[in-house]
Image (tube, rainbow, N blue to C red):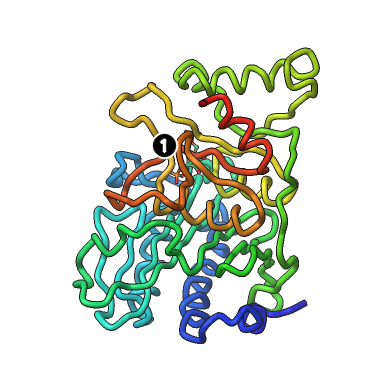
Amino acid sequence: MQRLAPALREDNVPLDLISLIKTVLAATKEISFRVGQGHLSGLMGSTLDENIQGEVQKELDVVANELFKDILLESGFVKAISSEEEDTSVAGNPDGKYIVSFDPLDGSSNIEINSLIGTIFSIHPAIDGMDASDPDMFKQAGNKQICAGYVLYGPSTMLVMTTGKGTHFYVLDRTYGGYLLVERNVQISEDTQEFSVNMSNQRFWESPMQDYINDLLLGTEGPRGKNFNMRWCAAMVGDVHRVLTRGGLFTYPADSKDLAKPNKLRLMYEANPMSFLVEQAGGLSVTSTQRIMDIEPTDIHQRVEVILGSKNEVNKCLSYYK
Ligand code: AFP
């Protein structure tokens, strides 16, 4: 099995970007170790603090965020970082060529139940002439990403990453201490009979999404004429990983539960990197009105509606909005 750096060189990834990716992954190896320690790590509880999104932070969220922040800022490769757990972006090396956005621990409600969690990251080019402390540098569309990926801390620790030359799967080999390539150019099947959505929000969705999901639930007795299975991990990393592995449709639709917050998922830390991975694997990733990677961000903590996965099923879902 191929090691990470040669696999990236095969995709003509520049050497300094490979070094940055290795820096990101060094932090994930430490997080993987701590996640694997479970209760023994002493980090299973909640803090008394809330992040900028108004969510109570878990101890592991805070530790993972500090780890990422320190390792990236000390590396010298990055001009600035932006994290789901930070109020605003943080300046790094003014001459750094890259900026990194990350969700250090996605799916934190799964920590206490020993279930799937992960780290999501997205790399954009730094903008020359802009101050390293200016958060506006992060207001770049997803189509400008040069690398995106996630690390899933499951029964095995998996890295799923793209640099724009396909989406590849790697597994952390603890005996060797690095990630090994296990599947190149993953492809999402165009059709599926599986969907993924938090059904408890159903009554708050807009009517097109209600109609679409109702038709899936009717199975062979409804207009789709086939049965659909449903899966929900409560961690986008887990749900997207399933879609990349065996197809499916994943959605976090707009809802009216909290009118101040019609969308849940974050554009920079969740939607954009996952969209890059999904599109590179032949799938689609959209809102009900546009391609996610074409959204021009207005705020670094912006939230967005997400419908992604198997191409034909995403298009079918969109047809309910027309
Ligand atoms: P955190 O990053 O705060 O852990 O949230 C995870 C997440 O944004 C995403 O990974 C899930 O799909 C979604 O929340 C699940 O949220 P609900 O279970 O509350 O619907």
Q: Is residue 175 left or right of residue 132?
A: right
Residue 208 image offset from top left, x and y in percent: 52, 21
**Residue projecting furthest to the bottom:** 15
Quarter residue 316 falls in: top right
Residue 126 image offset from top left, x and y in percent: 33, 73
The residue closer to the viewer here, 286 or 184, is 286
Q: Residue at x 25, y 53 (%)?
A: 87
Q: Is residue 158 left or right of residue 82?
A: right
Residue type at mark 1 is Lys
The residue closer to the viewer here, 89 or 185, is 185
Q: Residue at x 39, y 34 (%)?
A: 263
Q: Can you say whether 82 is above or below 227 in the image?
A: below
Count up the numbered dots. Answer: 1
The residue closer to the viewer here, 266 or 232, is 266
Quarter residue 157 falls in: bottom right
- State which quarter of the image contains the N terminus: bottom right
Q: Is mark 1 within 8 Å of ligand 1?
A: yes
Q: Residue at x 49, y 82 (%)?
A: 19
The residue that label 1 is drawn on is 264
**Residue projecting furthest to the front:** 322
Q: Residue at x 43, y 55 (%)?
A: 103
Circle 1 SS class: loop
Q: Is residue 194 left or right of residue 125?
A: right
Residue 114 image offset from top left, x and y in percent: 60, 45
Q: Can you say whether 158 is above or below 204 in the image?
A: below
Q: Check disc 1: other Cα within 10 Å, few if <14, some if 14-19, many if 20+.
A: some
Quarter residue 32 falls in: bottom right
Residue 18 image offset from top left, x and y in percent: 52, 80
